[in-house]
Image (tube, rainbow, N blue to C red):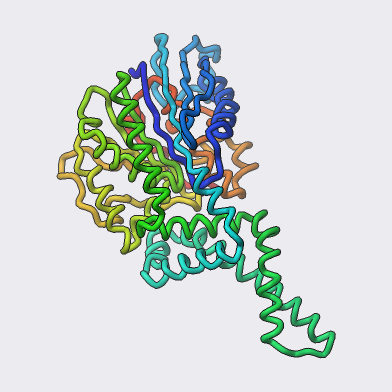
Amino acid sequence: MISRRCVFFIGGYDPKTPTAFFRRLSREMELFETVWDVQTSRSDVATPEGDVGVLTVSSSHRKSTLPDDDVSEKPALPVEDKDWQVTTDFYFLGLDSIVTRDAARPLPVRLFRYLVAFFDYWLTGTAFSFFSRSWRFALYFLYPFVTTLFLFLVALLASSVVLRLFGIGSLALATLIALVALFPLLATLGKRWSVTHLMDLWSFSSEYLRGKRPQAERLMDRYAAIVAQTTNAQPYDEIVFVGHSTGGGLILEMAARSLVADPQLARRDAKVSLLTLGSTALKFGLHPAAKAFRARVQTLVDEPALGWSEFQCLIDVINFYDTDPVIEMGLRPRQSGSPAFPVVRRVHMRDMTGASRYRRIRRRFFRIHYQFIMANGQRYFYDFFHICFGPAPLSAITPNQPPEAGVDQ
């Protein structure tokens, strides 16, 4: 049973400060307390530098108030009946400085860099790999391009109609006017529909996997140094590297760099594990140019003391459902007889949220995607908050038998 844990968390490509992230986490903590019948106390958020935030959470078990015959409320995850207390140092390692800087660029620059990235994914064959591995994710990949094309065609149609009213039938002039009109449309509707944000995400992803984002490289090295310093200074029972969405790829990078900064990290008393949630790491790993990224992930595979759990969900379009990232990247797997690396688990969002809550969010694909790192509405074997703040080690949660066959509806 865990009594002291350290979590290093990298989320998606979001403009999220440590203060904003922990504000949401504290709100979700109230639901975690209710569902799992626990008590928590939280320190003030420390922000030692830039995008880094640290919160210490103490969690303890209190005697259940549930009726003995209320089977529906019994945990799907084994929890010790005896009293327990866990202290977790939670490190939020943000990308806010990168995301806000990308979003501050002029829209023509953002669009141009996005189009370079978009066609690069096609010309290298990576986009075809998306379709062969996960067609839902491939549609997500197409979304900003298709929406931008739609806005352009609307502008082109409108400009053509107006020009014809003045007796002008020039397609070239109509196209020029549509191009000019596209940018206000992207600045308004494109922003509201997350198109411009996803444009930046894909240009970042393409540039990062080619080693063309030195700011991000420096950030990963700085975070690796924080890991080495923190884990050497404190005795922990468990150390967990958590990555969600784009962070599912970046956390692998950062963990590999952490092993370079501290080669003994995974070989001391604390159990060290990787946890990737709704991960999009394959948008890096499937690209032919991502040789450095795949080489770093291979160092994780080759570290036998490391564990890795990957949680995927069919209804979430922003993940590579039913894939093994090590196999898909063509890496050398661990020897036969070794524990699986990663342990790939499939989850059902409806079982996490409860039926009524699921009906409210099922068509909001960003909200579905973020459920991985939000509190569950009912007890289920996968629970982000229980993994981070509960007494069970990650290795004890992932080997459970999978949920019964079926898909989210």
Where on the picture, by quarter, is residue 395? Answer: top left
User: What residue do we see at 57% from left, 57% from top?
Assistant: 105
Numbered disc total: 0
Quarter of the image containing the N terminus? top left
Where on the picture, by quarter, is residue 336? Answer: top left
Q: Is residue 257 left or right of residue 109?
A: left
Image height check: is 136 above or below 83? below
Q: Is residue 380 left or right of residue 237?
A: right
Q: Is residue 96 left or right of residue 185?
A: left
Q: Position of residue 239 (x, y in %)?
A: 33, 28
Considering depth in this image, is 36 or 22 the residue closer to the camera? 22
Q: Position of residue 248 (x, y in %)?
A: 40, 45
Considering depth in this image, is 216 or 37 the residue closer to the camera? 216
The single residue placed furthest to the right in the displayed view is 165
User: What residue do we see at 53% from left, 39% from top?
Assistant: 371
Considering depth in this image, is 132 or 190 the residue closer to the camera? 190
Image height check: is 374 above or below 108? above
Q: Is residue 360 visible?
A: yes
Q: Position of residue 59 (x, y in %)?
A: 47, 16
User: What residue do we see at 67% from left, 54% from top?
Assistant: 192
Q: Is residue 283 visible?
A: no
Image height check: is 117 above or below 359? below
Q: Position of residue 243 (x, y in %)?
A: 41, 40
